[in-house]
Image (tube, rainbow, N blue to C red):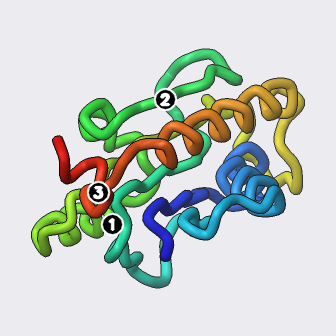
Amino acid sequence: MSRLMVLGLGNALNGDSGLGFYAVRDLYREGWPQEVRFTHRAGMESSSISLEGYSNLLILDAFQNGKSPGTLYRYDHEELAQHRSCLRDQRLWEAITLAELLGNRIEVSLLGIEPAELEWEFTLSETLLGVYGQFLDSVRQELRILLDRPTAESPIAALD
């Protein structure tokens, strides 16, 4: 069973906006453990997302926050809540809130890059391509940390 959802946001047809799509695609190919589920949502326009059964949500996205293009971001749950207006679709917060109302506390974090171009392109900009490898390394490191962390169902966590 998956306990960690990696959610790539963005539209791969709009240049740097496709960062989440490309990252999820590339990381999925690496053969992560079964408890990691990779999924992509192009702006989440057509349907809601269910977070039932997940304890962690890692969002990958081109994140516009006014810094220099190519700037890497990492926000934890509390920091992301303060910057959530920068997210593309507020329905994601509705899904997180609903899960919490149903008794499922989800730790949310975001890894992103400040985009350089959001024009009609089928690839990332040269700026993002220059830091894409570093971004994937950051995501891999975050995944390892999340996978090593005991869950509430873990016997180790029950001893605390």
Which residue in the structure is indicated by mark 1? 91
Q: How many other residues sit within 10 Å of disc 1, few (<14), some (14-19) or many (≥20)?
A: some
**Which residue is found at the position 67% from the left and 40% from the top?**
140
**Which residue is found at the position 66% from the left and 34% from the top?**
115
Give the mark nearer the N terminus: 3 vs 2. 2
Residue 57 appears in the figure: yes
Work out whether residue 107 or residue 156 is closer to the camera in this orientation and state it: 156
- Work out whether 92 lies above or below 137: below
Q: Quadrant of residue 72?
A: top right
Q: Which element carries disc 3, helix, strand or loop?
A: helix
Q: How many other residues sit within 10 Å of disc 2, few (<14), some (14-19) or many (≥20)?
A: some
**Which residue is found at the position 28% from the left and 63% from the top?**
153
Q: How many other residues sit within 10 Å of disc 3, few (<14), some (14-19) or many (≥20)?
A: few
Between circles 3 and 1, the one closer to the viewer is 3
> Which amino acid type corresponds to the residue marked 2 in the rendered image?
Arg
Tell me the number on the disc at residue 104: none
Cα separation, mark 3 vs mark 1, equals 34 Å
Residue 154 position in % (x across, y down): 32, 58
- Work out whether 86 lies above or below 99: above
Which residue in the structure is indicated by mark 3? 155
Q: Residue furthest bottom?
A: 47
Residue 40 appears in the figure: no
Between circles 2 and 1, the one closer to the viewer is 2
> Which amino acid type corresponds to the residue marked 3 in the rendered image?
Pro
Residue 6 position in % (x across, y down): 55, 58
Q: Which element carries disc 2, helix, strand or loop?
A: strand
Cα separation, mark 3 vs mark 2, equals 29 Å
Quadrant the C terminus occupies: top left
Q: Residue furthest top?
A: 68
Which residue in the structure is indicated by mark 2? 74
> Which amino acid type corresponds to the residue marked 1 in the rendered image?
Arg
